């Protein structure tokens, strides 16, 4: 056994996978083709997602912080993930909990803000503290960490995803990809078990979120068929119901209980809940200051209490099955993920819903982080064609508000990403010179009932009679599930493009400011950091170009080759001279010079993909395969293109 | 419009082997998906993204018989818009179905039965589309006319299916 780990000084940075959970967070990486978690200082892979704010600045994260919650319930933030991407007036802020919330000040974005030691802290900042510790732990083990895949609940909306990305940025992490948690779990399962084919359901009930995903695995391609869930449903809700019950028995009104008592009741409820997983009866004990309460409780009583939480998973499961065009018995395996699937009543429920015994042979606590590490490793690799591939979907329909407040779906839920679609709209009034676009996310008929993502106005359209202007709106969702909307007036060519920064999120400026404020970055010189980043980018482009030339150099004629070599040489010169500005410019130059090569390489690859397997041959190999009768038959909006918008 | 059949290298027909379509989509995704280009220079990344989006869009269009029929009609220079009203008999039928759905709303079994009934009607229209588009010779004006009528009906049935399907959420 090696006693010392020898660090290879030129070893490339190790890509990492992060499960940023409501209750626990983990970081994992690949070792000899297998995922492994990094241990926290207490030798557990699970870092409690708890952040304690100290009196004189600074924070404590994890187990240590958790120990502070009882005495400092307001300064110790637990389950901050439930508030990610939420507005200050979100219903979540009114549920049982010890926190004090601050309203956004003038000019501040409408994010939830916790009042902690006289300042306001956003959930993004809290998450960034957790990510920072994970990064530090990983660095201690791996020396240099590369990019990170961070998992998010599949049912996270645009705002919640953006908030997660912002948190990573604050923590100084390069995000390779946001990966949906159930998909990560399936990836870990599929690869671990050497399965090559089949349809699986992932049932993921954690502390604060619930996801169900149906996916099929075929020759290493994991294709998500449908996904559903509830981004605010989990074990925390059981704890709340249980705690409210205990407070009730103590004769305390949950609405007026002190933060200490609320914290104590929630903690006692969780402890008792865990005990009831292993035995039929236990004692719940709440103590806070003078008050104390003890009562024995049977598992059946507890199950009656939390039945509403368990039942709330049913509609999403049924909907996901219907969207995938499957009956429960057509699912080849049900994968359980998340700590709350340990609750016997939850297992029973899952068994009933799918009519089969679920699988849980990989540790449900670690499986998501494992999947993230596998994906990080794949993304950092050379993109070899036989690597596993994930084809994920958008969880919620994306659309625009049209006349009469109706939400017109442009990309329906369960559309495979990356996705893009354009739709044309027209004016409804004579001489209308602006279009107001309201981007919404959700399944409801009326725009007002859906999540509002962004509003923007396309101006400067020449006055035309009603119906004469033609507005083309393009929705584009990338592989992270992030949306960009572009609007263009077709007669004039006036165009406007927005990265949809959700109305509830932080603005790009907010994030930049926080980045500057955070002690870690304030110290490092901005210019040095920028130069380093630019050089890394430049080296990446050079390495990629060289690799492409080695394989497909024959696609260029002599002149083209000489031009490319010249562009690379010119870039290397300015790297050597450490001239940041020129490095940036010449990187762009090289990138442009490689376009013809890239285009031809891609054409070649596509031809190989299509020729490699004649359709007749495909038909042979797929004959014995079960077919999915109507996958997402739900897509059936009619194709009239000229809709009026307001 | 880009031809989704051409993009996926499949014959321009209404009847198509679902499994073959999915296989093609997987093969192309393996080549073009953004995950394969994370380490690539930005220009190449953008290019791959454009193509992956186009492939997914073509896959979506061909996967569903309704959008597949629309694509075929468009490729033949026709389109189906608001102006295409179905025969009064069909409107009556759909109205009756809607009423039945309103009454059945709280009973999943009844909704499911209605749904099955309408799905059978949709499948009949899909057969009509297949015979209109897939004859040995390229479809003539009469065949395209029949296809268009079948598509209009299919759309009505599908809209009803969606409503019924949504009603099952309660
Ligand atoms: N043995 C157990 N019995 C019942 N619930 C459990 C058990 N272990 C963990 N949990 C619950 O699982 C939830 C945390 O699950 P986890 O997967 O870590 O969530 P997240 O991914 O949201 O952080 C908590 O609500 C916790 O109480
Ligand atoms: Mg989790």
Image (cartoon, rainbow, N blue to C red):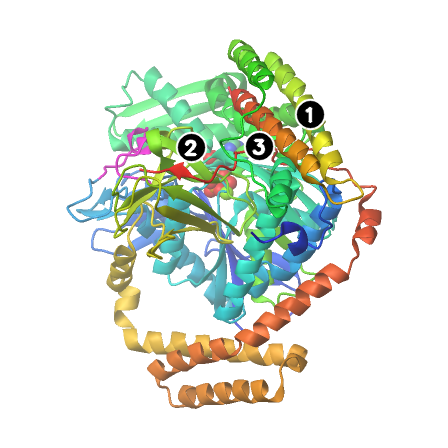
Name the front one of labels 1 and 3.
3
Say the numbered circle drawn on residue A634: 3
Q: Position of residue A388 (x, y in %)?
A: 66, 56
Disc 1 vs disc 2: Cβ atoms closer than 8 Å?
no
Q: Where, quadrant-wise, is the C terminus of chain A in this rendering?
A: top left
* Residue A435 vertical position relative to residue A231 in the rendered view, above or below: below
User: Which contiguous range is marked in magenta?
Assistant: A86-101
Is ligand 1 closer than 8 angstroms to the Cβ of mark 2?
yes
Nearest the viewer among A283 and A529 is A529
Give me the C-alpha separation between circle 1 and circle 3: 24 Å
How far across and down, in percent of the image, does residue A20 sit?
45, 49
Residue A1 position within the rendered picture, expressed as x and y whole percent measured from the top left: 66, 68
Read off the chain for label 3.
Answer: A
Tell me, for residue A355, which label it has, or none: 1
C-alpha span from label 1 to label 2: 27 Å
Q: Kindly tell me whether mark 1's CB lies below 8 Å from ligand 1.
A: no
Nearer the observer, A599 or A507: A599
Q: Is residue A632 left or right of residue A517?
A: right
Q: Report whether residue A370 is seen.
A: no
Give the main secondary structure, helix, strand or loop, of the magenta stretch.
loop
Residue A236 - label: 2
What residue is at 62 percent from the left and 47 percent from the top? B75
At a point 20% along the width and 40% down the height, the residue shown is A102
Residue farthest to the top, as pictured: B103
Residues beneath discs 2 and 3 located on the same chain: yes
Query: Label 2 to label 3, Cα distance in Å?
Result: 33 Å
What SS does tag 1 mark?
Answer: loop
User: Which secondary structure lies at badge 3?
Assistant: loop
Q: Residues within 10 Å of mark 1 (few under 14, many from 20)?
A: some
């Amino acid at each position: 056994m090696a006693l010392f780990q020898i660090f290879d000084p030129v070893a490339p940075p190790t890509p990492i996978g992060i499960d940023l959970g409501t209750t626990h967070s983990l970081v994992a990486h690949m070792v000899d083709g297998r995922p492994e978690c990094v241990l926290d200082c207490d030798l557990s892979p699970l870092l409690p997602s708890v952040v304690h704010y100290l009196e004189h600045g600074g924070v404590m994260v994890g187990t240590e912080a958790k120990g502070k919650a009882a005495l400092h319930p307001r300064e110790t933030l637990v389950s901050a993930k439930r508030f990610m991407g939420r507005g200050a007036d979100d219903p979540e802020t009114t549920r049982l909990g010890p926190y004090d919330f601050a309203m956004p000040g003038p000019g501040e974005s409408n994010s939830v803000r916790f009042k902690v030691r006289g300042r306001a802290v956003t959930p993004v900042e809290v998450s960034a503290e957790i990510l920072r510790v994970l990064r530090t732990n990983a660095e201690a083990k791996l020396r240099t960490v590369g990019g990170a895949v961070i998992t998010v609940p599949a049912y996270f909306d645009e705002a919640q995803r953006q908030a997660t990305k912002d948190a990573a940025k604050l923590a100084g992490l390069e995000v390779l990809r946001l990966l949906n948690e159930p998909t990560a779990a399936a990836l870990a399962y599929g690869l671990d078990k050497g399965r090559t084919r089949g349809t699986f359901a992932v049932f993921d009930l954690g502390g604060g979120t619930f996801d169900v995903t149906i996916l099929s695995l075929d020759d290493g391609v994991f294709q998500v068929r449908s996904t559903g869930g509830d981004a605010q449903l989990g074990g925390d809700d059981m704890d709340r119901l249980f705690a409210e019950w205990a407070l009730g028995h103590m004769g305390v009104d949950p609405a007026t209980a002190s933060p200490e008592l609320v914290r104590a009741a929630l903690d006692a409820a969780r402890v008792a809940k865990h005990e009831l997983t292993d035995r039929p009866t236990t004692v719940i004990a709440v103590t806070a200051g003078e008050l104390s309460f003890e009562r024995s409780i049977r598992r059946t009583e507890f199950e009656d209490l939390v039945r509403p939480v368990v039942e709330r998973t049913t509609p999403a499961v049924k909907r996901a099955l219907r969207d995938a065009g499957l009956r429960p018995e057509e699912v080849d395996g049900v994968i359980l993920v998340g700590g709350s699937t340990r609750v016997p009543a939850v297992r029973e429920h899952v068994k009933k819903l799918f009519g089969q015994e679920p699988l849980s042979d990989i540790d449900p606590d670690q499986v998501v982080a494992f999947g993230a590490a596998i994906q990080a490793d794949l993304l950092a690799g050379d993109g070899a064609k036989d690597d596993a591939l994930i084809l994920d979907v958008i969880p919620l329909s994306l659309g625009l508000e049209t006349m009469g407040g109706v939400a017109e779906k442009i990309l329906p839920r369960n559309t495979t990403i990356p996705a893009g679609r354009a739709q044309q709209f027209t004016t409804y009034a004579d001489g209308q010179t602006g279009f107001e676009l309201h981007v919404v996310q959700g399944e409801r008929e009326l725009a007002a009932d859906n999540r509002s993502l962004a509003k923007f106005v396309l101006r400067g359209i020449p006055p035309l009679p009603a119906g004469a202007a033609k507005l083309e709106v393009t929705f584009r969702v990338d592989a992270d599930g992030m949306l960009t909307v572009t609007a263009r007036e077709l007669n004039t060519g006036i165009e406007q493009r927005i990265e949809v920064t959700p109305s509830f999120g932080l603005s790009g400026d907010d994030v930049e400011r926080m980045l500057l404020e955070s002690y870690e970055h304030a110290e490092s010189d901005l210019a040095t950091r920028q130069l380093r980043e630019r050089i890394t980018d430049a080296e990446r482009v050079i390495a990629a170009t060289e690799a492409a030339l080695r394989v497909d150099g024959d696609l260029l004629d002599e002149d083209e080759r000489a031009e490319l070599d010249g562009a690379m040489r010119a870039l290397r010169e300015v790297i050597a001279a450490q001239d940041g500005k020129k490095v940036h410019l010449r990187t762009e130059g090289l990138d442009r010079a490689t376009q013809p090569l890239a285009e031809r390489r891609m054409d070649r690859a596509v031809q190989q993909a299509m020729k490699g397997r004649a359709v007749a041959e495909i038909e042979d190999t797929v004959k014995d395969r079960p077919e999915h009768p109507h996958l997402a038959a739900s897509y059936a909006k009619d194709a009239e293109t000229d809709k009026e918008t307001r | 419009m880009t031809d989704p059949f051409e993009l996926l290298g499949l014959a321009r027909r209404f009847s198509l082997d679902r499994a073959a379509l999915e296989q093609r989509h997987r093969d192309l995704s393996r080549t073009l998906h953004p995950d394969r280009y994370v380490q690539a220079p930005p220009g190449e990344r953008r290019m791959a993204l454009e193509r992956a989006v186009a492939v997914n869009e073509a896959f979506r269009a061909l996967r569903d018989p309704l959008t597949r029929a629309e694509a075929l009609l468009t490729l033949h220079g026709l389109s189906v818009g608001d102006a295409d009203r179905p025969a009064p008999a069909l409107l009556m039928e759909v109205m009756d179905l809607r009423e039945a759905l309103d009454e059945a709303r709280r009973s999943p079994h009844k909704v499911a039965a209605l749904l099955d009934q309408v799905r059978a009607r949709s499948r009949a229209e899909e057969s009509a589309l297949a015979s209109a588009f897939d004859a040995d010779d390229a479809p003539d004006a009469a065949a395209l006319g029949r296809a268009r009528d079948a598509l209009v009906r299919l759309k009505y049935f599908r809209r009803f299916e969606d409503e019924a399907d949504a009603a099952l959420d309660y």
